[in-house]
Image (cartoon, rainbow, N blue to C red):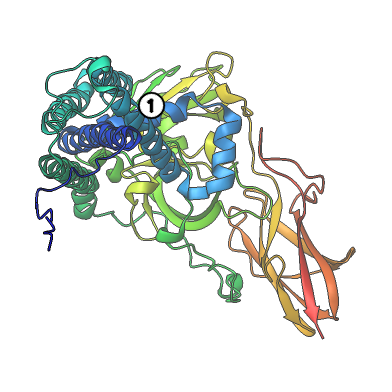
Amino acid sequence: MGSVTLNTSTEPRPAAGPTPEGREVHSRVVGGAIGLLSAAVAVGVGHLTAGLVGGTSSPVIAVGSTAIDASPEWLKSYAIRTFGTNDKAVLVGGIGLVVAIVAIVVGVIALQRPRVGVIALVALGALGAAAAIGRPESGIGGAVPSILATVAGLGTFSRLRHAAGLATPVSAGETGGRLPPSFDRRRFLLAGTGAAGLAAVSGLAGRFLLRRAEAGASRAAVRIPAPADVAPLPPAGADLHIPDVGPFITPNDRFYRVDTALLVPSVTAEGWTLRVHGMVRNELSLDYPTLLSRPLIERDLTLTCVSNPVGGRYIGNARWIGAPLADLLREAGVSSGADQIVSRSVDGFTVGTPTAVVMDGRDAMLAVAMNGEPLPLEHGFPVRMIVPGLYGYVSATKWLVDIELTTFGAYDAYWVRRGWAQQAPIKTESRIDTPKQSATVVAGRVTVAGIAWAQHRGISRVEVSVDGAWQPARLAAQDTIDTWRQWVFVWDATPGDHTLAVRATDDTGATQTAAPADPAPNGATGDHTISVTVAG
C-alpha cells in the first residue's frame, strides 16, 4: 500500500499589507492631524498668555477685531441682521474654522516639505502679533501672546513629526508621500493626545482668565452715590403687563448689545480717566471718583441701535444715573465753531455727536449706573455716554475715555467712514410684539400689542391696520418723551388669513414713514407688518 505524504508545515503565510492607496490616505490623516494639533496648541497658548497680559492681545481676538474694523459696511450690517448679538461668536468660530482647514492642508503638505509647516506657523504668529500691536489698547506688548503661541506651535509640530518618524525629512521619491516604515501608531497617538490636551487646557484656562477680568472685581467694589436729581417712578399705567410685550424697564441681562468689541474691554474704575480736549478753552481730565462727586441725575431713557430693522429687537429702556454732559462741556468752554463731539472708547472706537444737540437742554449724560447698579461690563463699565434722541452710533459710546471737540468737516467717526450718515436722530417707529408673525389665533377678541418710540419727541398716537383699515390703539401712560410707549389694540378677529400692521405718530404730529428702507445709512423705515391666521 502506498504512503501519502502530508504537508504539515505551520510556517505563516505573508499577510496582505495595506495597499499603496491606503498607506497614502493614512499618511494624509497623520499629516492633517499634525497640522491641526500644532495650530490648536498655538491658539490655546496664545489665548492663555493673553489672559495673563491682556485679553485683546489674544491672536484670535486681535485678528477678529481687526477684521471687524476692516470689513465693509454691508458685511457688518449683514452680520448684525443675520446673527444678531451672536455675530461675534460667529466671527470667532469662522476664524477658528479657517485656521483649522488651513492647518490640515499645510500639515499634509508638510509631510514632504516640513518647511511649509514652519513657515505657516510663523506667518500665523506674525499675523496675530501685527493685529495685536495695531490695536489702540495693546501696543508693542500685545505681540507677546502671538510670539509664545508661535513657539508652542513650532514645538508641537516638531514633537509630533518626531513621534510619527518624520524627524529626518525624506525625499518624495523615497516615500511617495507616505509615512516611513518607522511610523509607530501608538507613540503618535500618545503624542497627539498630549497635544490635544495641552490645546484644550490652555484654551479653557485662557478663557477663564479673560472672563475673570479685573474689571469685574472693580465693578463689584463700586458704590454709586445717590443722584442729586432723582427721577420719579414711571406712572402706574406705563407698563400694560401684556404677555409677550417686554416690561417697561428692560432688565440689564436682556438689554440689547451691538458694538464692535469682539472681547468686552477690561477697564477698572481705579484706572479710568476721561480727557476733554480739542476746541475748548480749558482742557479737563477726570478720574472716576471725581466724576462720581459731581451732581448726578437719574433718568429713564430708551436706547435704539441704527441697525434695528423694522420690527427689530435692538431697542431697550432703562433707568440710568450719570453726570450731565452739558455741564462738563461748559466747564471746558467749547470754542465757537466746534460743531462735533468725538467720543472715543478705550478700544479706539469713535462716535461723532452734534455739539448743539448735547447743549440743547436734553439729558445727555456720562452714565455710570444702569437700573440701580454700576454699568455692566458689556454695557460700558465704568462710564458710557448717552444722548437721548440719537441712534447709538452717534451718541452712546461705551468704555468712554476721551472726548474731543472738533468739527464735522475735520473728522469722520468710525461708522461715518463706512458710509453711515453723520446726523442720525432716531426715527418714529413702532412694533407688533403679539401676536407673532405667522401665528394662528382663535377667532374672537385677540390682543394685538407692542411698543412705539420717538425719543425726545414722544408718541401721541398709535394705529393698527387690519387688512388695510387703520384703527386707533390704546396707549399706555407716557413716562417721558425720551422713553418708549406701550400700546394695545383689541381685535375682533374673524376666521381666515389676515395682515396686521402698526404705525405711530409722534408729538410733533409726524407719522412714521411707511416707505420701507434698510437701516443704512440713518435708520430703517416702514410699517411693521405681519401675517396671521385666525382659526374658526
Identify which residue, 102 or 360, lies in the foreground.
Answer: 102
- Quadrant assignment, res 140: top left
Residue at the outermost right position: 469
Q: Quick one: quadrant of the N terminus? A: bottom left
Position of 24 compared to 360: left or right?
A: left
Residue 519 percent across, percent down from the top left? 66, 40
Q: Residue at x 33, y 42 (%)?
A: 264
Above or below residue 83? Residue 75 is above
Q: Which amino acid, mark 1?
A: Gly
Above or below residue 240? Residue 321 is above
- Quadrant assignment, res 403: top left
Q: Quick one: quadrant of the C terminus? A: bottom right
Callout 1 secondary element: loop
Q: Residue at x 29, y 37 (%)?
A: 26
* Residue 289 visible (yes or no): yes
Above or below residue 252? Residue 457 is above
Q: Residue at x 35, y 21 (%)?
A: 283
Q: Which residue is mark 1?
A: 348
